[in-house]
Image (tube, rainbow, N blue to C red):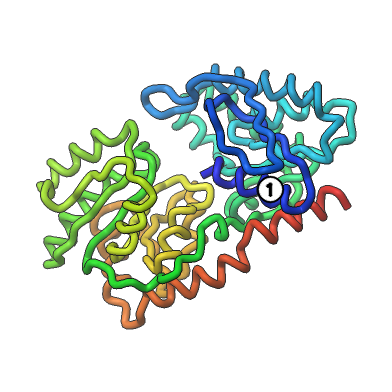
């Protein structure tokens, strides 16, 4: 998700006459837009086998970023630095020391101390939380992806950030209200514990217990795939939950069109772009209330989906049935929500606002 945001931001900056250096890790060959120069500063894996970012990768990348910014910072009108991990933002601050070049910290998420410790362990999580606090004060300005994250950032002492609109990262579909396959659910994302996709087999079992002919397709892969398989066996829904693995764009589009509802039981989302992607096909979504889940902000209950109070099967099933039992055409209202949000919550508008804030 973050990579999509930064590529789109770079494209919009080029459209406004800027030349952009995209400083990143070495992915090999990258198809960069015209006007964007890709600058690889570090090469390596960033996750351990459990799907957690490693400290060594964060330090290695931050060192590369610091060296580049120190050497080239005086050539830039401004620098935008991802704050996840926050070491990248702090490295840019160090590289720009003694210079007046504006530094914008972009916060995909802001985590509580509890979340950091759960993610990285007690010691590393505590250190990361302290560094996050320092990073909130390091930038000239900040951007975030949601009001939820804005509130978190101001609570640790940062001035009010610019909230980016991201809905226009998803294309407008030529036909958003194609017929769906009744009572078919779709989940899309990397299989990591925070996504909680292992709750879906229990949801399907509960819906079928209620007499629904419910099935689900789960797209993606990752360290939690085995837990999803175990949950499928536990709830005896082997024939009703399909693991599709990674799929290409055409197959994903077909899955969206035939699905009745997207289910995102995640407890941690910085934005929830998959909700907007589903809405572009007229597919409503069910999300879960959680301390670190900003995707809830994208749902207007009764318009483009429903919100579950927890990932428990009965709560999720109640939310899904709220969508399925709606007396309004929720596919049509979801498509209408997306058409409006793509303009009102657009990155295009946000980039213009950011340039005004930083360079005025």
Across and down, in percent, residue 187 comes to 32, 52
> Horizontally, is 69 left or right of 64 in the view?
right
Across and down, in percent, residue 146 comes to 59, 54
Residue 176 versus residue 227 in the image, above or below = below
Identify the residue at image location x=62%, y=61%.
Answer: 346
Quarter residue 75 falls in = top right
Q: Can the viewer see residue 10?
A: yes
Out of 246 and 323, give the one closest to the viewer.
Answer: 246
Identify the residue at image location x=65%, y=32%.
Answer: 38
> Horizontally, is 80 left or right of 98 in the view?
left
Identify the residue at image location x=39%, y=50%.
Answer: 249
How many numbered circles does the render carry?
1
Q: Which residue is mark 1?
A: 143
Across and down, in percent, residue 125 comes to 53, 27
Across and down, in percent, residue 284 comes to 38, 66
Residue 75 versus residue 299 in the image, above or below = above
Quarter residue 206 falls in = bottom left
Question: For the residue labelled by badge 1, is the local secondary structure a helix, a strand or a loop?
Answer: strand
Identify the residue at image location x=66%, y=45%.
Answer: 153
> Horizontally, is 194 left or right of 39 in the view?
left
Residue 110 versus residue 287 in the image, above or below = above
Q: Can the viewer see residue 305?
A: no
Quarter residue 34 falls in = top right
Q: Residue furthest bottom?
A: 327
Residue 272 versus residue 179 in the image, above or below = above
């Amino acid at each position: 998700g973050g990579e999509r945001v930064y590529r789109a931001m770079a494209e919009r900056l080029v459209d406004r006459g800027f030349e952009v250096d995209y400083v990143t890790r070495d992915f090999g060959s990258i198809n960069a837009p015209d006007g964007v120069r890709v600058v690889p500063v570090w090469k390596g894996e960033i996750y351990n086998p459990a799907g957690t970012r490693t400290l060594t990768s964060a330090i290695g990348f931050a060192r590369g970023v610091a060296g580049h910014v120190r050497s080239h910072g005086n050539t830039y009108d401004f620098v935008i630095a991802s704050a996840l991990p926050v070491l990248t933002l702090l490295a840019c601050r160090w590289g720009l020391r003694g210079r007046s070049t504006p530094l914008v910290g972009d916060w995909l998420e802001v985590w509580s101390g509890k979340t950091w410790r759960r993610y990285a362990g007690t010691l590393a999580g505590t250190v990361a939380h302290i560094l996050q606090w320092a990073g909130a004060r390091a930038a000239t300005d900040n951007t975030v992806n949601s009001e939820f994250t804005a509130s978190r950032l101001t609570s640790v002492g940062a001035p009010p950030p610019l909230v980016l609109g991201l809905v226009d990262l998803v294309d407008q579909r030529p036909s958003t209200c194609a017929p769906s396959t009744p009572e078919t659910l779709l989940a899309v994302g990397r299989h990591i514990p925070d996504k909680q996709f292992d709750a879906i087999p229990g949801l399907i079992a509960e819906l079928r217990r209620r007499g629904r002919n419910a099935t689900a397709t789960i797209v993606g892969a990752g360290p939690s795939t085995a837990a999803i398989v175990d949950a499928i066996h536990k709830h005896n829904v082997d024939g009703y939950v399909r693991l599709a693995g990674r799929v290409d764009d055409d197959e994903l589009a077909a899955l969206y069109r035939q699905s009745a509802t997207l289910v995102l039981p995640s407890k941690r989302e910085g934005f929830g772009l998959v909700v907007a992607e589903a809405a572009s096909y007229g597919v409503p979504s069910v999300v879960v209330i959680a301390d670190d889940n900003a995707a809830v902000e994208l749902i207007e209950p009764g318009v483009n989906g429903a919100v579950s109070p927890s990932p428990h099967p009965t709560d999720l099933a109640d939310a899904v049935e709220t969508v399925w039992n709606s007396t309004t055409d929720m596919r049509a209202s979801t498509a209408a929500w997306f058409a409006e949000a793509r303009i009102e919550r657009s990155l295009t508008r946000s980039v213009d606002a950011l340039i005004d804030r930083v360079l005025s």
